Amino acid sequence: MNMVIEKIGIYLEYPFVRYALIVGILIALCSSLLGVTLVLKRFSFIGDGLSHVAFAAMAVASILNITNDMPITLIVTVICAVMLLRTGQNTKIKGDAAVAMISVGSLAIGYLLMNLFSTSSNLSGDVCSTLFGSTSILTLAQAEVYLCAILSAVVIVIFVLFYNKIFAVTFDENFAKSSGTKANTYNLLIAVVIAVIIVLAMNLVGSLLISALVIFPALSAMRVFKSFRSVTICSALFSVFCAAFGIIVSILAGTPVGSTIVAADMAGFCLFSMVSVFRR
């Protein structure tokens, strides 16, 4: 045990390890805050749909040889989040159908474009790293860490400032509308914030595993706590711990970062489920 602690201390002396931990914790925190709302609104797979949109945007950026693909990916994902919200309110296309349509379509188009126009000699490796996460979280530049910190701070501030409105829209949207709350505006705000989180999380866990950061912390907290505030706080602490633990384990064991974090989330969910059973 002492050897493991000493090894962790040695790794923490390297800036890239500290950067990875900071970014991973911030992304996990932001994902968990909005995850509770999405799970309660039965719209948790919006993260999955938007992550596939981000994959298509990154494919276009790679074809155009754009080195910093975050701005174009962020813009496209936010636009699709707005479109997804509008489409989901259409009586002819329900919310889950709209998510599935955009998710599958974006994934197919992104992979098709990468096959037709990509000049990379390792197309399979690029696609795999984008879908399941890559080691880019361990090669972050200081400017990227600052950008992630700023966007994460914006997400947290928005959640804290509009906590009561988000709470009202989450539990009873019709009552919120009747009491004068602009529910559509706050739904749009939630969608935009989720789009920002998705783009930030792409390098951490990949587009196919992002939903785990949204779903597992919220569901785990709901196994033990019942109030919205308690679930949100527990979800945030759970997500931050699993992200930090997963990153450290992946560095020590040489395992994929994204998959290790999701495995930690799954283990935590099983533990919380057992606690819930024993409490009954």
Image (cartoon, rainbow, N blue to C red):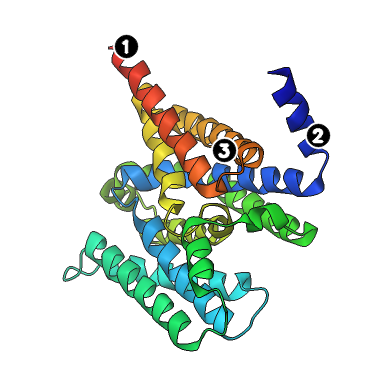
Mark 2 crowd level (few <14, some 14–19, many ≥20, 10 Å Cα): few
Residue pictured at 33% horizontal, 48% vertical: 176
Q: Position of residue 48 (x, y in %)?
A: 38, 58
Real-space Cα separation, disc 1 to disc 2, in angstroms: 40 Å
Quadrant for the N terminus in the image: top right
Which badge, 1 or 2, is on the more N-terminal residue?
A: 2
Q: Check disc 3: other Cα within 10 Å, few if <14, some if 14-19, many if 20+.
A: many
In the rendered image, residue 142, in percent from the top left (x then y), is placed at 79, 57
Tag on residue 246?
3
Q: Which residue is mark 1?
A: 278
Give the label, 1 or 2, closer to the camera. 2
Q: Residue pushed farthest left?
A: 92
Residue carrying label 2: 10
- Kind of residue indicated by mark 1: Phe
Residue depicted at x 52% and y 67%: 125
The answer to which of 112 and 102 lies nearer the viewer is: 112
For this view, does 27 lie left or right of residue 108? right
Name the element at disc 3: helix
Q: Nearer the viewer, mark 3 or mark 1?
A: 3
218 relative to 277, above or below: below
Asked if residue 86 shows in the view, the reply is: no
Q: Which amino acid type is shown beneath numbered disc 2?
A: Ile
Give the image quarter of residue 243. Answer: top right
User: Could you tell me the amino acid type at mark 3?
Assistant: Gly
- Is tag 3's residue or tag 1's residue first in the polypeptide sequence? 3
* Secondary structure of the residue carrying numbered label 2: helix
Residue 150: where, in percent of width, then height? 69, 55
The quarter holding residue 120 reads: bottom right
Cβ atoms under marks 2 and 3 closer than 8 Å: no
Please report the residue visible at 59 percent of the width from the left and 86 percent of the height from the top.
Answer: 64
271 up-or-down from 250: above or below? above
97 relative to 132, above or below: below
